[in-house]
Image (spheres, rainbow, N blue to C red):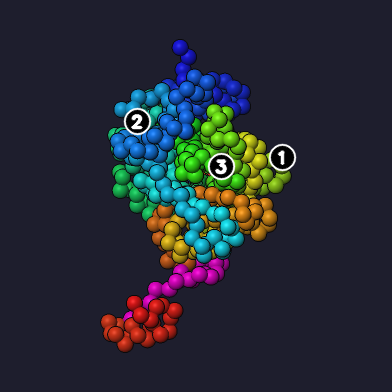
Amino acid sequence: MTALSVLKCIECGHEHQIDEPVYVCSRCSGLLDVVHDLERLRPSISRETFDGRLRQVEAPYNSGVWRFKELVFPAVADDQIVTRGEGNTTLYRAPAKLAAWVGSRALSLKHEGENPTGSFKDRGMTGGVTHAKLVGATSALCASTGNTSASMASYCALADLQALVFFPYGNIAAGKLAQSVAYGALNVQVRGDFDACLELVRQASRQLGIYLLNSVNPFRLEGQKTIAFEILQQRRWRVPDWIVLPGGNLGNTSAFGKGLSELYTLGIIDRLPRIAVIQAEGAAPFYQSYREGFATRHQSKAQTLATAIKIGNPASYFKARRTLSLTDGVVESVTDQEILDAKAMVDTSGIGCEPASAASVAGIRKLIAAGVIGADQEVVGVLTGHVLKDPEIIMHYHQGTLAGIQSSFANQLRTIDPTLSDVQSLLSRSHAPSAL
Ligand code: F0G
């Protein structure tokens, strides 16, 4: 019998078996998709199957990734899955003040920072590390702006794989670096940017035979597409008008398009949402290409305070283009000021997120102001990382010490002597409640 899933090149269509550790096409170096035999799987895929598993308390089906196993990695045996119960993240109805600031009357936020290591990467890593074990890998590597590495270090520790991480020198948020150190990875700062690190990873993987866990690995994207699945399931399969997400290396953008088209093909959903990808203005090569109707593939020297998306040459460019044409998608760019204002608003709403995540919210606000997204259209913004990932930028923002950034919503730390009179004079000067 033929395999349930194969690796298929998106450029030339050449197929590879899924037990081969290949990340790009062996013929033309194109990106690979994990293509599932949807017709064979169709009888075992239904809303009822996926919804029924919401009651599961045991691994792997208690995971918000493996609940959708038939569309993630159908052939893998349950006891071979490396999982931390990832996913199951909250879909928040945006608090009123935040929604009003954004200009939306129908805004929800999917908080992927609620994953085990604090970012959506865990959804991809459970797929990637499970595959690594299946092909007999003993070590794995990635280039990272910090979240992939935190996640990879954790899942590799769990699966007893040696993790090797390449970071762009001096550009990693403290929370992320600390995680990778704590989980026991071999952490290497490379004198170069993320794009240089990723190139080094490709060479090292090829020449030294180390398993590659960046998002060019198609098994990562199979896990990440379940963000979209879970959004739909939480909305009782009602399709929103828009899903809006930040774009860096464009793995998520690619994964969403693939996953949504599978659900549509199977009749699980009756239409596709539109996708909006938001890039930071100083790291917006995909936006530049979009503006030109994708006539040229742009690359840039990336510059943004949102270090997670400080990427100048997105690896999944061609898959992301496919997502845009499939979903009638758009790409927008936002300044660091807009990102940090949006972050302050998400943070003070009580939800909180890391800077790159706030690009989604800044982008929704901009697209509503421009009339691209309607104020009454149902919008889901994806918050990709946890507020604690980047504590330094929070303190700098609120102390007004970020060069070139106006701290419009600053919440300053106060210092007093331990006297009641100091407390009283503080309360009378501030807007704090007078009676606690
Ligand atoms: N948001 C966060 C918090 C991220 O960490 C990343 C990527 C993105 C958005 C962009 O997602 O690459 O799928 O377009 N972080 C990678 C890393 C590059 O190394 O952690 P994308």
Label 3: state its secondary structure: loop
Residue corresponding to mark 2: 81
Label 1: state its secondary structure: loop
x and y, in percent, of residue 401 in the image: 48, 69
Residue at the limit of the structure toward the left, as seen here: 418
Q: Is residue 172 visible?
A: no
x and y, in percent, of residue 146 in the image: 43, 48
The residue nearer to you, when weighing 251 against 296, is 251
The image quadrant of residue 426 is bottom left
Queried on whether the Cβ of the residue with tag 2 lies below 8 angstroms from ligand 1, the answer reads: no
User: Looking at the rendered structure, which numbered label has been put on residue 239?
Assistant: 3
Label 2: state its secondary structure: loop
Vertical position of residue 415 compared to residue 217: above or below = below
What residue sits 39% from the left and 46% below the top?
Answer: 115
The kind of residue on which mark 2 rests is Ile
User: Looking at the rendered structure, which numbered label has been put on residue 295?
Assistant: 1
Mark 2–mark 1 Cα distance, whole angstroms, equals: 42 Å
Nearest-to-viewer mark from 3 and 1: 3
- Magenta stretch: give its range: 398-416
Queried on whether the Cβ of the residue with tag 3 lies below 8 angstroms from ligand 1, the answer reads: no
